[in-house]
Image (cartoon, rainbow, N blue to C red):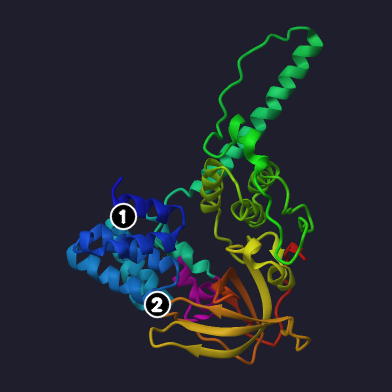
Amino acid sequence: MTILQFAKKLMHRRKFGDAIRLLQSNYDGYKGTFEYYLILGISCLYVGDIGNARQNFDQARSIKVENVDLYLGQAAIFLNESKIDRALEYYVDVIGMDPKNKIAASAMDFIKNLNGDDTPLKECIETGKIVRFYPALGINPAIIRNGILVGFALGALISCAIVLFASKTGNLAPKPPAPSAFSEFELTEEEKAYSGLGLPYVASGTSAPASVKDGVRTGLDIQEAYKMALEYVSKERDNAARVELNSILLSEGVLPSIRAKAEGLFASLQIPTFDSLSDNFSVETVLADPSLYSNCYVIWDGRIANLSSSEDGSLRFDLLVGYENYESVKAWVPVLFGKTTQREFDTKKPIRVLGRVGEVDGHVVLFAQATYQPLHGDSLADAKLQNID
């Protein structure tokens, strides 16, 4: 597999940061290559790095003019900048190349329904829903994964039913077990036998295994944690699965093969939106043990302080968590945005942030995925979230 093929695979798995780092570190070997600039541009677009996305798309277009994904990417940049007329021109060109292109048709319908009011467009950008107009990434491996998991579970249920029926009718005949359709992530018998021998992860500052509400566990044996991760994934509770997988990856003595499977499963998990996030963790829970919640996603409300920008266009501010209604501040958490972020914030209004938990210089930060501020009034709409404290 070539570097470009691997980078494209990472992009399809929504591992945009990894794809960008891989491509940038191999620039000398692929400069002047259309696909290199296209993959890098699309990856930058999905992480919100509009400036580098534009630059790479321009480089790609200097090599090859007509390409549907290139035009969709450039149109998306114009949408992010609220340059609606320019975006529409590009979508018309896409339809000319691919009359049945659903992304371009959907974007054109969206623009038509604006009727001169760009408020829905701003909301689309702020909530991250604009990604539906970005170049398609193909089938998400996570969707395939969920289908396999469901099929595996149904297969197991059907097998049990057959065995039960056969035992009652006296027609039970031994048959060799069918191979699992979920072989990529399923533990082998050898791994199950040794997975509990590692030293379990213990929450920082404690002398005994910790526990988290609603079944999310740490400090248990590796096999049980992995089993729980698979169960959460099958229920589309990727955030809860991340905690279980972190507990495995943080444990000592884990078999390399189990660690590799845990890392692979982690990499396949989907990036949530405001509407799709499940298992939201409170700021108190995360601050109590940041490593356990590393790369989990959270939605926290609050107000903005210390808003600043850098020369490269990147933004940051401190989120006063819990202060959206001028009540007590639960924590000050830095919120970081990518380069050339085309966003404006009202420091006088509350804000809701969807972000990925990380650490910088030993401090918990949020890498922003999407934000929401009310267009009218000074209060946030109630969020229907499954909060875990």
Amino acid, disc 1: Asp
The dot on residue 84 is 2
Q: Nearer the viewer, residue 214 or 119?
A: 214
The residue at 69%/72% (across/down) is 287
Q: Position of residue 81 (x, y in %)?
A: 41, 79
Q: Nearer the viewer, residue 106 or 236?
A: 236
Up-down relation of residue 102 to residue 158 (above or below): below
Magenta-tinted stretch:
108-127
Q: Is residue 184 left or right of residue 380?
A: left
The residue at which mark 1 appears reads as 98
Residue 125 part of the magenta segment: yes
Up-down relation of residue 235 to residue 64 (above or below): above
Residue 120 appears in which quarter of the rendering? bottom right
The residue at 61%/62% (across/down) is 296
| Of the image marks 2 and 1, the number of the one nearer the N terminus | 2
Q: Residue furthest right?
A: 168
Q: Are marks 2 and 1 in contact (CB under 8 Å)?
A: no
Residue 369, can we see it? no
Q: Is residue 200 left or right of residue 67?
A: right
**Which quadrant would the C terminus be assigned to in this image?**
bottom right
